[in-house]
Image (cartoon, helix red, strand yellow):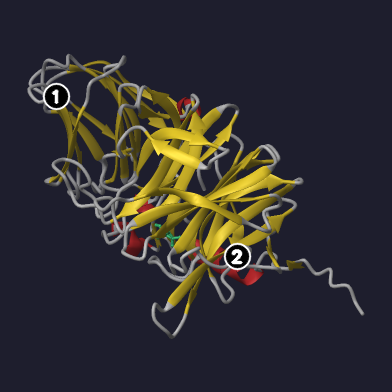
Amino acid sequence: LFATVHLRVPKRINTELEAYIEEKKAEINPRYKLHYHVTPPVGWMNDPNGFSFFNGEYHVFYQFYPYDSQWGPMHWGHASSPDLVNWEQLPTALLPDEEMCYSGSAIVKDDQLVLLYTAHVNTDIDPFYYESQYLAFSDDGINFEKYEGNPVLPVAPDGSPDFRDPKVWKHGDYWYVVIGSKTPDDRGRVLLYRSPDMISWEFLNVLGESTGNMGYMWECPDFFEINGRHILLMSPQGMEPVGDRYKNLHQTGYIVGTFNYETFEFVPEVDFQEIDFGHDFYATQTTENDGKRILIAWFGMWETPFPEAVDGWAGAMTIFRELVLHGDRLLMKPIDAMTSLREETVWDGKFEEGEKISFDKTLELIVTSDLNQKINIQITGSNGGDQILLQWDPEVRKVVVDRDGDIRQVEWSPIDSKSWRIFLDASSMELFCGEGEVVFSSRIFPNGEWLVTNLSPQSVDVVAYKLRRSVP
Ligand code: FRU
């Protein structure tokens, strides 16, 4: 008798939760809180989600648990920015109902911001969970309503319970999505679908799959074109270390290849390469705006300590990076707008052997040296805590990041600039070598006033800026 036209489940801002967040925020110990990286207002953060540009603003959502500084039933936290540098905290965008709101992506469709995310539901029977894909809509980019017809993608083609982290894009008349999954014999894979309306989805192909040594599950896939080639970026879980490579519990990296929208086949041309060599980097997401492909990642890693957790929060995003394909490799550079954070020049010139720069919490440091000589830059705190050494060894031509003896190192052959650009922020270090050929992202926890010391056997050239606060 009645035509049902309830297409959306009203789910507006939860004022109780927002009041709780404001109250708890006041109790946070700010000593490690980052000044120009997106962090949760309180509680726990992992993957970036829904990175998009809508109505003149960038939006970043994130895996969020407001009630404790460790992982719990997932919400989507939310922040927006006009320029990827100055961020504003927005109300929590998605709250769990019967489902936890796992990672996903966003796209603008018919003047709405549409979220496509994984609903993770725990059950009593083996394998004790299943995952499907849900939609949520927003007219204003602040209030989100879950679609009443969820799930739009109920199950993986082979029924695998691991079926998550949809990344959506538009090409021609269709929306496409890649979703992370695994084979029945535990090899990571990425599935490709398309849809004429984002509601009904058609399975197209397995876009990529581990042949055995690339982990048991591929999380957070992303797929995009640069210079006419296609990049499959993802986070394989459980790759074994090989020499200097794959030293974290899980990795993030990419495969360069070609893709055909007629056969839906992705032909890899280059083996998997890690995109960041630091201790704390995972679950990337990219978006394109103004012809630029911008990347961010969770500045963290599973099953590692989060020293800030005792302060009432845990986890952060990296700074935003622009991707450029150079030959067969992705270069990752801080976005241009990062220079707008420079507040004051604290050093400009020779930095003699043994000399120190002391500073309060934030610094951008540009180090230039003769690469036929050793470089050794030390970062310490006046009250102890972590000691970090950033080194260059001309014999083996490797950059070394030594965090209290836990070493990450990788060969570097500069394609142009021979400088290091180092971003330091209250409990973080990001090192960009040259044009972004080699990047390390590591959380670091020196206590008290920070000191940068030149332990190289010669002077190096240094420009250093104090950076201003740009996040709440
Ligand atoms: C990656 C991940 C995703 C999942 C989310 C849960 O870090 O495990 O695969 O959607 O985190 O918080």
Where residue 329 appears, x then y in whole percent? 34, 28
Q: Is residue 102 above or below residue 142?
A: below
Q: Quadrant of the N terminus?
A: bottom right
Label 1 – label 2 distance at C-alpha? 51 Å
Residue that protrudes farthest toward the right in the picture: 1
Q: Is mark 1 within 8 Å of ligand 1?
A: no
Q: Residue at image x 68%, y 45%? A: 108
Q: What residue type is labelled 2?
A: Glu
Tell me whether the residue at label 1 lies in contact with that at label 2, contact meaning CB atoms closer than 8 angstroms. Answer: no
Q: Residue at image x 20%, y 43%? A: 382
Specify whether 111 is left or right of 297. right
**Could you say whether the residue bearing mark 1 is in a helix, strand or loop?**
loop
Residue carrying label 2: 18
Where residue 149 appears, x then y in whole percent? 70, 68
**Could you say whether the residue bearing mark 2 is in a helix, strand or loop?**
helix
Specify whether 197 is left or right of 132. right
Circle number at residue 397: 1
Toward which corner of the image does residue 21 lie, by quadrant? bottom right
Q: In this view, does 78 lie above or below 225?
A: below
Where residue 403 appears, x then y in whole percent? 18, 44
Q: Is residue 461 above or below residue 465?
A: above
Task: Give the mark, 1 or 2, whose residue is nearer the N terminus.
Answer: 2
Visible in this render: residue 59? no
Q: Residue at image x 71%, y 69%? A: 148
Of the pair 150 and 291, the residue shown nearer to us: 150
Q: How would you rate the neighbour count of disc 2 (Cα within 10 Å): few for under 14, some for 14-19, many for 20 or more?
A: some
